[in-house]
Image: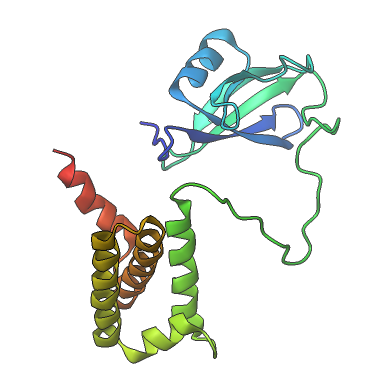
């Protein structure tokens, strides 16, 4: 069984079948994988275009599939391929050519619910490191009673903003509520996925 992510996709690593060099990483949907297996050339799913993407359709550098294997968890695919030419849009034979020798700057997604996991990762890091000057670390140090009190306060402020019909204030207060709830989850040893499991049961 292949495990799809929350967008219905699975990452697929393309590897040169002759040299063993990893040449690119893409994502496949069930539909693009079906075309790949049936046609013998790699099809990905373009997340930016939200459509199937026949690799090489623009450059002419197609990737011919020798084998497709899944990892032990079924959530990553390995495509061993014979490339017709350079695979990267830069003209390089592989997309992996930029060395990372020190911690780089990171770009963040500005849309979508991924901020929940990103923020929780920061909270977990604060929990481990407890740096001076961190509000999150201060809350965690004060314990679950204080964090729970903050959740109650933020819930009340969110409700009051809703009663006033203030759209921007509701969003701001709801953000505070979600943040403090995430801190409470971390302090209690729970994770957002534990919440998602309960929410899935409420889809009935």
- The x, y position of residue 163, in whole percent, is 23, 61
28 to the left or right of 97: left
- The x, y position of residue 192, in whole percent, is 33, 59
Which corner quadrant holds the N terminus?
Answer: top left
Quadrant position of residue 8: top left
- The x, y position of residue 26, in whole percent, is 61, 33
Relative to 68, residue 182 above or below: below
Quadrant position of residue 188: bottom left
Q: Which residue is drawn at 51% across and 83% down?
A: 129
Which corner quadrant holds the C terminus?
Answer: top left
Q: Residue furthest top?
A: 39
Judging depth in this view, the residue of 198 and 110 nearest the camera is 110
Relative to 18, residue 5 above or below: below
Tag count: 0
Q: Residue at x 63, y 14 (%)?
A: 41
Q: Which colour scheme is used?
A: rainbow
186 to the left or right of 125: left
Q: Which residue lies furthest to the right in this view?
A: 91
Q: Residue at x 79, y 63 (%)?
A: 101
56 to the left or right of 8: right
- The x, y position of residue 141, in whole percent, is 38, 90
Q: Residue furthest left?
A: 204
116 to the left or right of 181: right
Quadrant position of residue 88: top right
Q: Residue at x 40, y 32 (%)?
A: 2
Relative to 55, residue 14 above or below: below
């Amino acid at each position: 069984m292949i495990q799809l992510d929350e967008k219905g996709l699975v990452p697929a690593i393309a590897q040169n079948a002759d040299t063993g060099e990893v040449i690119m990483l893409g994502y496949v949907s069930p539909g693009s994988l079906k075309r790949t297996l049936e046609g013998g050339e790699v099809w990905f799913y373009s997340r930016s275009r939200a459509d199937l993407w026949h690799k090489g359709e623009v450059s002419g550098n197609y990737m011919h599939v020798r084998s497709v294997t899944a990892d032990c968890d079924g959530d990553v695919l390995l495509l061993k391929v014979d490339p017709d030419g350079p695979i990267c849009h830069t003209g390089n034979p592989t997309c992996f050519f930029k060395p990372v020798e020190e911690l780089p700057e990171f770009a963040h997604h500005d849309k979508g619910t991924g901020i929940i996991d990103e923020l929780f990762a920061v909270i977990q890091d604060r929990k481990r490191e407890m740096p001076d000057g961190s509000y999150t670390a201060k809350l965690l140090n004060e314990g679950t009673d204080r964090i729970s009190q903050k959740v109650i306060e933020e819930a009340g402020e969110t409700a009051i903003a809703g009663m006033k019909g203030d759209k921007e204030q509701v969003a701001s207060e709801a953000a505070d509520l979600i943040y403090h709830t995430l801190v409470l989850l971390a302090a209690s040893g729970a994770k957002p996925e534990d919440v998602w499991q309960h929410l899935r049961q409420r889809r009935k």
